[in-house]
Amino acid sequence: MGKADKDSIAPSAPRSGVSRRSFLKGAGAAGLAASQIGLPALEAEQTRPDEAASLGPDPVPVRFHVNGQPYVVRCEPRVTLADALRDQLGLSGTKVICDRGACGGCTVLLDNEAVVSCMVLAVAAQGKHIQTVEGLAQGDQLDPLQDAFIAHDALQCGYCTPGMLMSCKALLAHNPTPSRSEIKTAISGNICRCGTYPHVFAAVLAASGQPDEG
Ligand code: FES
Ligand code: FES
């Protein structure tokens, strides 16, 4: 857990195409919107007697369980869960592709619900249980869903695969025998540029013990 013990993390790479002027305009608009719609919630949050009034901007400790193991990381409140998992815990199976909630590559399970971790702040995962693609296999024993992905050739370049697996894992946890239509809905947020969708449907049907009738 060496990396997680660091008091600070390397700053994120600058986002391309965002000028200082456009960033400040966006931040101002966001601040105005927050002041209009979020103030009561914010005040309630800040007046909780058992919590600090505000967090950051310096790193703060965040405690959560990842793949069954307890961790404490220190990160600035602006850091996403995806970046904390990758940069502080070294769990690079979670892919950050679009970094804006549009591709599903960073999907993990947060208290058994699929979330895009690039849109979740690490501090928001305080006290929660997270499962990443690294947590699917038990030692050398792959999860049956991973076996089915291999057997049905449900990956090509593999870049979308961790997020795809976690969305399918969440689906099967809630619905052990999903229909093809339900599988489509479950992975509708996962973009596969290689077009492996029919193979993913076949893999999930096989992993759930159902025939693939096309
Ligand atoms: S990297 Fe998170 S949704 Fe694309
Ligand atoms: S297997 Fe290449 S993006 Fe899905």
Image: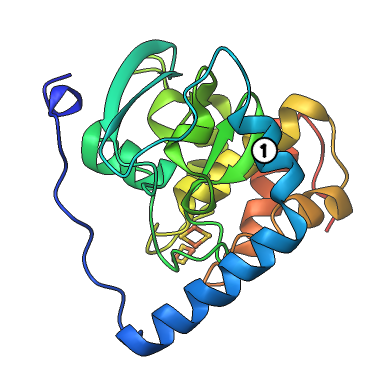
Which quadrant of the view contains residue 199? bottom right
For disc 1, the neighbor class at 10 Å (few under 14, some 14 to 19, many from 20) is few
The answer to whether any part of residue 102 appears in the image is: no
Task: Give me the residue at 37% from left, 11% from top.
Answer: 69
Q: Secondary structure at mark 1?
A: helix
Task: Give me the residue at 52% from left, 19% from top.
Answer: 51
Percent position (x, y) of residue 156?
Answer: 42, 62
Which quadrant of the view contains residue 196? bottom right
Please determine whether, in this image, residue 144 is positioned above or below residue 164: above
Residue at image mark 1: 43
Q: How is the image coloured?
A: rainbow
In this view, the residue in front, 107 or 214, is: 107
Percent position (x, y) of residue 144?
Answer: 56, 26
Percent position (x, y) of residue 2?
Answer: 11, 22
In this view, the residue in front, 100 or 91, is: 100
Q: Quadrant of the N terminus?
A: top left
Please determine whether, in this image, residue 94 is positioned above or below residue 68: below
The answer to whether any part of residue 196 appears in the image is: yes
Q: Is residue 188 left or right of residue 148?
A: right
Task: Give me the residue at 80% from left, 55% from top.
Answer: 185
In this view, the residue in front, 58 or 140, is: 58
